[in-house]
Image (cartoon, helix red, strand yellow):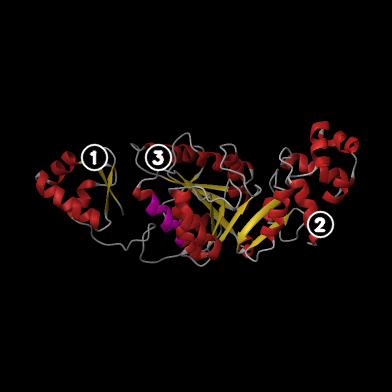
Amino acid sequence: MQAAELEAWLRLGLIPQLGPVKFRMLLSEFGDPDSALSAGTNELAKVVGRKLAVAITDGPDGELLRSTLQWVSREENRLLTLADGAYPKALLEISDPPPILYLKGNSELLNNDALGIVGSRSATPQGIANAEAFANELSDSRFTIVSGMALGIDAAAHRGGLTGRFSSIAVVGTGLDIVYPARNRELAHDLSQKGLIISEFPLGVRPLAANFPRRNRLISGISLGVLVVEAAVKSGSLITARYALEQGREVFAVPGSIHSTLSKGCHALIKQGAKLVETANDVLVELGEQERTNNKTSDGTLQGSKPELLEAIGFDPVDLDTICERANLTAEKASAMLLELELNGELARLPGGTFQRIR
């Protein structure tokens, strides 16, 4: 795209009041941004109303326009518009594709088949282990892993995808000059170097609550399907799953303990027809891939015998008294063994004094 054409797209895209729907209305009426910008206020008002027409005539913030053009000029950054042949074809299939996408990293990943993996920000250690292992195996198979760069399941999915062959894409709810949450700064750096970060929001846009449901529709829109790993009943992950259904994508869910609030969202999805998955193979087969066989479980650990104490704990969170009763151990002996298992990464200590096994 020529510099003048790119600037015309930005002059429209940086009007704060102009959302994707009105932007596409202008494209439909005038053909391209340059023609829309050349139209008079009265002509624009017939399409988007007078208030917005005046804002378009006044133009965007000049400093923001200059800084964005400078940002785009850097090698690692790119803008894709609806007129660009490299615009993701999967997003063209959804009802409200963003007119402009901001990209940082390897834009070639948008050509790959993708799978969304989402879930709770306050995930359990087992949920994080599951998300990372599923993402790694699916990335090694052929899917680029897409998520939202939130804490918990999202971050684990990105880590797993980045260590696989087909990497990972983060869809964020801020401008690409902002890392949110700040604790994911190192992850954001890794994604920009070995994966891709994308946003429909201009530079400088802060993490407003309304941005994240919009972000979620792009996670599902880019993907062939969405896998939900741990989600409460009222969860942003279920919003992503709903978008996936509306967009004709597959929905998968990992089941969990009937006692865990973070399993209830997944169980609700399964009741509504989502595919229950226990291994990465379940996803691959559903999406038409040949089943893979190896000596690993879905969470990436080698199969084999487990210590008696772990067998006594099971897979649900459990308190010390119950562990002692099941394993016929004193509290002192059980505590010492639990500490050793925790240090070995086989067990997690949860809030409330309970313990949970990590497979």
Q: Earlier in the sequence, mark 1 or mark 2?
A: 2
Residue shown at 36%/46% (left/top)?
Answer: 124
CB under 8 Å between callouts 3 and 2? no
Identify the residue at the far front of this view.
Answer: 63
Residue 5: numbered disc: 2
* In front: label 1 or label 2: 2
Q: Which residue is mark 3?
A: 262
Give the left or right position of residue 52, taking residue 270 as reference: right
Identify the residue at the far top of this view.
Answer: 50
Give the left or right position of residue 317, taking residue 215 as reference: left
CB under 8 Å between callouts 1 and 2? no
CB under 8 Å between callouts 1 and 3? no
Q: Mark 1: which amino acid?
A: Gly
Rendered-image quadrant of the N terminus: bottom right
* In front: label 3 or label 2: 2
- Residue 157 pos. (x, y %): 47, 54
Residue shown at 64%/50% (left/top)?
Answer: 203
Give the left or right position of residue 122, taking residue 23 as reference: left
Mark 1 residue crowding within 10 angstroms, few (<14) / some (14–19) / many (20+): few
Give the left or right position of residue 318, taking residue 136 as reference: left
Q: Which residue is mark 1?
A: 353
Rendered-image quadrant of the C terminus: bottom left
Give the magenta-colored segment's residue range.
128-136
Q: Is residue 115 visible?
A: yes
Q: Main secondary structure of the magenta part?
A: helix
Answer above or below: position of 235 versus 224. Answer: above
Q: Earlier in the sequence, mark 3 or mark 2?
A: 2
- Residue 207 pos. (x, y %): 56, 42
Q: Mark 3: which amino acid?
A: Leu
Q: Secondary structure at mark 2?
A: helix
Q: Mark 2: which amino acid?
A: Glu
Tell which of 214 and 133 is nearer to you. 214
